[in-house]
C-alpha cells in the first residue's frame, strides 16, 4: 500500500509533474510533500486531500489507497443507458470547478 507520500509521488510521476509543481498548481505549501516525506506531518486535511485527488482525477479513498472503500458498481434499474452511466462515473472523478463548467455546457445544449 505504501505511505501517503509514496502514493502522491507515484501519481505525480505518472502525470509527469513534480510534487512541488502539484503543490503550486493547487495553491498548497511547497513544503507539504517534504513534510510528508520526512514525517514532519502524518497526514493532510480533508480539503487538501480532496484537492489532490481532484488534481489526479481519483477519489480520496483511492488517494489513501483504500481499495475496499472504492465505490462498487451496482445493478440498478434506473433507466440510464450504459453511455449515461459512463458519463456519470467520469463526472464523479472531476474536480468541482470542472463539474460546474460541464453543467453549464449541458444546460446550453438542452
Image (cartoon, helix red, strand yellow):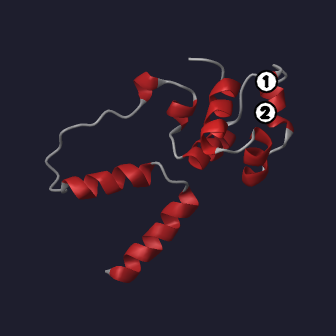
Q: CA distance from mark 1 to mark 2?
A: 6 Å
Where disc 1 sits, the SS reads helix
Q: Residue at x 81, y 19 (%)?
A: 39
Say whether residue 34 is left or right of residue 66: right
Where disc 2 sits, the SS reads helix
Residue on which disc 1 sits = 37
Is residue 27 shown above or below 7?
below
Is residue 110 shown above or below 3?
below
Q: Position of residue 3 (x, y in %)?
A: 66, 20
Say whether residue 95 is left or right of residue 10: left
Q: Nearer the viewer, residue 46 or 88?
A: 88
Badge 2: residue crowd in 10 Å (few <14, some 14–19, many ≥20): many
Q: Position of residue 37 (x, y in %)?
A: 79, 24
Badge 1: residue crowd in 10 Å (few <14, some 14–19, many ≥20): some
Mark 1–mark 2 contact, CB under 8 Å?
A: yes
The mark total stands at 2
Residue on which disc 2 sits = 33
Q: Residue at x 76, y 45 (%)?
A: 23
Q: Position of residue 110 (x, y in %)?
A: 31, 80
Quarter of the rendering containing residue 76: top left
Is residue 21 shown above or below 38?
below
Amino acid at each position: 500500500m505504501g505511505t501517503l507520500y509514496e502514493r502522491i509521488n507515484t501519481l505525480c510521476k505518472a502525470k509527469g509533474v513534480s510534487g512541488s509543481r502539484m503543490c503550486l498548481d493547487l495553491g498548497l505549501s511547497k513544503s507539504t510533500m517534504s513534510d510528508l516525506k520526512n514525517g514532519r506531518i502524518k497526514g493532510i486535511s480533508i480539503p487538501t486531500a480532496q484537492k489532490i485527488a481532484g488534481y489526479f482525477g481519483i477519489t480520496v479513498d483511492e488517494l489513501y489507497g483504500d481499495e475496499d472503500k472504492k465505490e462498487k458498481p451496482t445493478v440498478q434499474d434506473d433507466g440510464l443507458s450504459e453511455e449515461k452511466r459512463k458519463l456519470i462515473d467520469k463526472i464523479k472523478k472531476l474536480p468541482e470547478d470542472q463539474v460546474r463548467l460541464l453543467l453549464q455546457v449541458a444546460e446550453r445544449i438542452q
